[in-house]
Image (cartoon, helix red, strand yellow):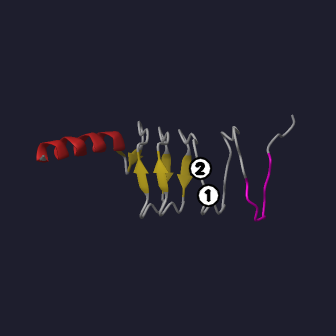
Amino acid sequence: MTDDTLHVNGIKQQLKADGADLSGSSFTDVNLSGANFNNVNFAGAQFEDANLSGWSVRNANLTHLNVYNADLRGASFSSCLTHGLTIDGIDVSDLLTAYRVLITKAD
């Protein structure tokens, strides 16, 4: 069996991927600070022991995204698909719905 996996180890290099399918890829001990992700599908992705502080995510598919032991200080999420996304076991879609109901009642 041929291993078609591209291995990038111990280098500092910018990577530009356009129209690429990198599903199933693995990133371990990688610095992606300042990286830009546009029109990227994060559905089912897993982030573990990740520094996502200051992360800004807009109009993204975060369905069934898994985030474990991450720093989310200052992170911002807007106009995202969040079905199945949980924070500490609480469904984010349910939290947003409840919040919007409370805001509507307060008006």
Residue at x-position 55% and y-position 42%: 42
Q: Considering only vertical position in the picture, is 33 above or below 43?
A: below
Is residue 26 found left or right of 101 in the rendered image? right
Label 1 – label 2 distance at C-alpha: 7 Å
Q: Quadrant of residue 91?
A: top left
Disc 1 target residue: 35
Provide residue 59's location: percent of width, then percent of height. 47, 42
Provide residue 72's location: percent of width, then percent of height. 44, 60
> Which SS does the magenta portion mostly show?
loop
Question: Are discs 1 and 2 less than 8 Å apart at CB?
Answer: yes
Q: Which amino acid, mark 2?
A: Phe
Residue at x-position 87% and y-position 34%: 1
Residue found farthest to the top: 1
Disc 2 target residue: 37
Provide residue 78's location: percent of width, then percent of height. 40, 48
Front residue (pair 89, 64)? 64
Is residue 105 found left or right of 20 in the rendered image? left
Residue found farthest to the right: 2
Q: Considering only vertical position in the picture, is 41 above or below 26?
A: above
User: Secondary structure under badge 2?
Assistant: loop
Provide residue 52's location: percent of width, then percent of height. 51, 60
Let me know if residue 28 is in the magenta part.
no
Read off the magenta span. Answer: 6-15
Is residue 40 found left or right of 78 in the rendered image? right
Is residue 33 found left or right of 83 in the rendered image? right
